[in-house]
Amino acid sequence: MKAVTIIQPFATLAALGVKTLETRSWATKHRGPLAIHAGQKVDKEACLIPQIREALLKHGINDWSELPTGAVIAKGILNDVWTIERSYGDKGIVKKIKHRHWLDKCMGRLYAR
């Protein structure tokens, strides 16, 4: 099975189905099952953003230290990949900047807290 590593708290938000889009600088031809791997890094500042903190609290996660790291925590389905473009200046120059991966149907956490 293919996997994608996502830093915390974003990996947990994907596992919970709160986060359904992932932006990467690369595209993939893969569609279908995809393991969600929580990387070793935790973005502690992101955990303090009110909307993220609220989503985590809603699911019983009270502190960043409770987030799993270095493990596959869910299985999702990669449905589609879109190229995101941004125009620059009045000449309308268009530059491809990122690929957005659409994760769908995350099927719960595979870890026990």
Image (tube, helix red, strand yellow):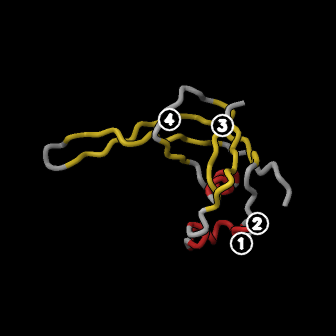
Pointer 3 residue: 77
Instruction: State the separation of the CA atoms marked 4 and 2.
Output: 31 Å
Instruction: State the separation of the CA atoms marked 1 and 3.
Output: 28 Å
The label on residue 66 is 2
Instruction: State the separation of the CA atoms marked 2 and 1.
Output: 6 Å
| Residue depth check, mark 4 versus mark 1: number of the one nearer the observer | 1
Instruction: State the separation of the CA atoms marked 3 and 2.
Output: 25 Å
Type of the residue with mark 1: Asp
Residue at the image position 69 percent from the left and 33 percent from the top: 33
Pointer 1 residue: 63
**x and y percent of residue 58 in the render?**
70, 69
| Residue depth check, mark 3 versus mark 2: number of the one nearer the observer | 2
Quadrant location of the C terminus?
A: bottom right
* Total tally of numbered discs in the picture: 4
Pointer 4 residue: 81
Instruction: State the separation of the CA atoms marked 4 and 3.
Output: 12 Å
The answer to whether mark 4 and mark 2 are in CB contact below 8 A is: no
- Above or below, 58 against 4 in this view is below
SS of the residue under disc 3:
strand
